[in-house]
Image: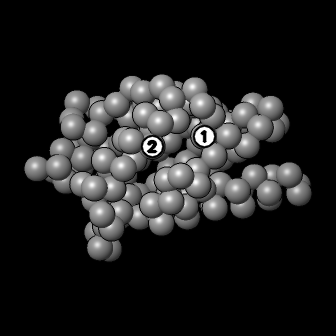
Amino acid sequence: MIYGWLVRKGTQIGWQRLSEHRIDDLPLAGDVRFVFLGDHALAADLRGADALRGWLRDLFTRFPRLRFEPEATVVEGGPWSMRIATRYVAVQDGQPVYRGCTFQRVVWGKLAEERILPDTQMIAAALS
């Protein structure tokens, strides 16, 4: 029970850091794999912490006041290979930019893999 609480708290802190655009404070594995699905300018299939941080900088350049509001999180596994699924809304100026689900694998506290399934119609509209 305590472990689950700690993981959820850590997840909340991660979303808060992301919402504050504190990219360099995110605990990323050096060879993190990141996929943002879709057929639009934000679509990506990247490997490496520097590549992911670059993608995030581009995202926050396009949406400078973007914040993330997690709606539901499910955590499974131990610290050696934890799986986290989160449904969230990306919001700017109180308006949804897009809704999405993210599936993550965290190894010893560092993001090793993330696959995001965004609402691609909302993304396309926001980018136009």
- Say which element carries label 1: strand
Q: On the picture, is 37 further left or further right than 10?
A: left
Residue 127 is tagged as none
Q: Is residue 24 above or below residue 91?
A: above
Q: In this view, does 34 lie above or below 62?
A: above
Residue count near mark 1 (Cα–Cα under 10 Å), binned few <14, some 14–19, many ≥20: many
Figure disc tally = 2
Spot occupied by residue 99 in the image (x, y as percentages of width and height): 37, 52
Q: Earlier in the sequence, mark 1 or mark 2?
A: 1
Q: Mark 2 points at which residue?
A: 53
Could you tell me which quadrant the N terminus lies in? bottom right
Q: On the picture, is 114 further left or further right than 119?
A: right
Q: On the picture, is 115 further left or further right than 74?
A: left
Q: Are marks 1 and 2 in contact (CB under 8 Å)?
A: yes
Viewer-nearest residue: 10 or 100: 10
- Say which element carries label 2: helix
Viewer-nearest residue: 73 or 112: 112
Q: Name the residue under label 1.
A: 28
Q: In this view, does 66 lie above or below 24?
A: below
Q: Quadrant of residue 72?
A: bottom right
Viewer-nearest residue: 42 or 94: 42
Q: Residue at x 41, y 58 (%)?
A: 89
Observer able to see residue 72:
no
Spot occupied by residue 31 in the image (x, y as percentages of width and height): 57, 26
Observer able to see residue 93:
yes
Q: Which residue is drawn at 30% across and 63% down?
A: 64
Viewer-nearest residue: 127 or 48: 48
